[in-house]
Image (cartoon, grey):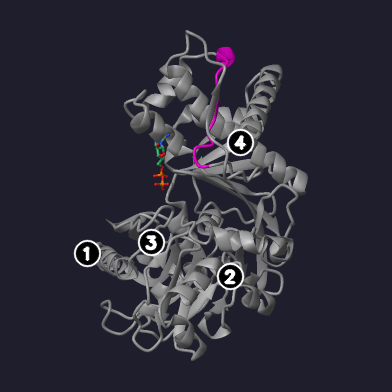
Amino acid sequence: MSASSGILSIDQGTTSSRAIVFALDGTKVASSQKEFTQIYPNNAWVEHDPEEIWHTTLETCKAALHEAKKKGVDVAGIGITNQRETSVVWNKETGKPIYNAIVWQDRRTAEFCNSIKDQESKVAAKTGLLLDPYFSASKLKWLLDEVEGARELANAGKLAFGTIDTFLIWRLTGGKKHVTDTTNASRTNLFNIHDLKWDPELLELFDVPSSVLPQVLESSDDFGMTEAGMFSASLPIAGVAGDQQAALFGQCCFAQGDLKSTYGTGCFALLNTGSEALKSKHKLLTTIAYTLNGKTTYALEGSIFTAGANIQWLRDGIGVIKNAKESKVLAESLDYDHGVFLVPGFAGLGAPHWDPHARASLYGMTRDTSQAHFARAALEAVCYQTYDLQQAMESDGIASSKVLVDGGMVENDWLCQFLSDMLQVDIERPYNMETTAIGAAYLAGLQLGLYKSLDDIASHKKIEKRFTPSIDKGIRKKLLSLWQKAVESTLAFSRG
Ligand code: ADP
């Protein structure tokens, strides 16, 4: 392969579709991005138009490939990473979706999920997930039950279900491949993460005929060739992973105990637990990190529903800051004993509490309380919440020796330092922040033989900055204890 080889990474996210061509050392060669419409047909319903997802993906791929070609980079294949759990059903004969994609945030199936709550421990044992509208199975059931004629067509074997990776691969291969990878399958509530098969008992519980399901491949695998004429050459699709797993891979978290935490609108922390599917006692999810050469690596996953969103609220909701950057300067202006705590339950509280009814609360204000306290408390909260996840993971069996961070929020040095202080481990911020997209490219590159091994991939990684713990131990203990009290009060308030 020539020195100018590249890999096209498709990063199909919740608000935009992106295509990035990476050189093998991880340098970005070309990129294109297009936002698409968010559809809110009802309270707590969120949909995407699959055709718009397809067109924005296709256009961005063409633009990135064109730019890469101009720069003399020869694209060898495609990796795909995608918004997880979002569900599409289409007609296998016409290729047309029968309805919009139901997005991961959509809560329309909450009542159904509650009605089978007594099955949760069985579902959790098989899938590693909770019984929640978030995951694909209840969305798929809704599509089959509510779209006119869908159930009959499904029973006749005429419909296909897929998460976004599957739908894109179907379109890219001209309908030749109906496939997914283990990481995406592990987010459906239908896939047994231990034997790596669609589970007949779960299919029955969610009333899903097996004929609609895609074949499940490894994360680096042969997902088919793009249809002739779509791009200037037909390209192999060689790597697939859901977005958070792709970020874990892109951060080179290949060893047991490696933890990555992404701080965007929300926060997702994934801990590599090796070949062991650890069962959490703290409401963390057990999920598939990746499957390579017949070997599956698992992860524990914890999410914080609002992270950067707290800062957005300060800016857009109550107008106490002008921009996100300002939060750093304001936070630095106060001492550790400023005394204000924000428990950001704006959208309920995630792991380790999973209280959807929790509300955000602010503690410890005085007449001196200023915008600086708000900013500092909002940043601190994200670090305390990550500490809670770290503790949950540790008590579930695996401690991490460092945390690899990414996402828009971690450009804030103050946040990274406070995170290191609370977690008492090094925080590493990579030079290349496109961890999700690069993860999919790495998976494809492995399959295509462009990388020899995981070590070969890791050799390209560059750390931009490392933060090490420096806080006084006594101060830390006091802060964590006050945080704990604030969370307990918030949970008590939510119980009524
Ligand atoms: P997403 O991928 O979820 O859209 P990004 O990774 O782009 O999110 O991160 C954007 C989020 O990061 C926003 O919520 C914003 O408030 C927050 N953010 C951006 N810069 C900073 C900063 N310097 N300090 C704190 N938060 C920031």
Specify the amino acid type for callout 3: Glu
Q: Secondary structure at mark 3?
A: strand
Question: Looking at the image, is mark 1 or mark 2 earlier in the sequence?
Answer: 1
Q: Give percent across and percent down for residue 430.
A: 49, 44
Choose the circle earlier in sequence order: 3 or 2: 3
Label 4: which residue? 494
- State the CA–CA distance, disc 2 to disc 4: 37 Å
Check disc 2: other Cα within 10 Å, few if <14, some if 14-19, many if 20+: many
Q: Indicate the position of residue 296 as horizontal and vertical percent values.
A: 66, 68
Quadrant of the rendered image holding ligand 1: top left
Q: Residues within 10 Å of mark 4 (few under 14, many from 20)?
A: some
Of badges 2 and 4, nearer the viewer stands 4
The residue at which mark 1 appears reads as 70
Q: Earlier in the sequence, mark 4 or mark 3?
A: 3
Is 118 above or below relative to 386? below
Label at residue 182: 2
Q: Position of residue 246 (x, y in %)?
A: 51, 59
Drawn side of residue 143 relative to residue 111, left or right: left
Q: In this rendering, would 61 be left or right of 239?
A: left
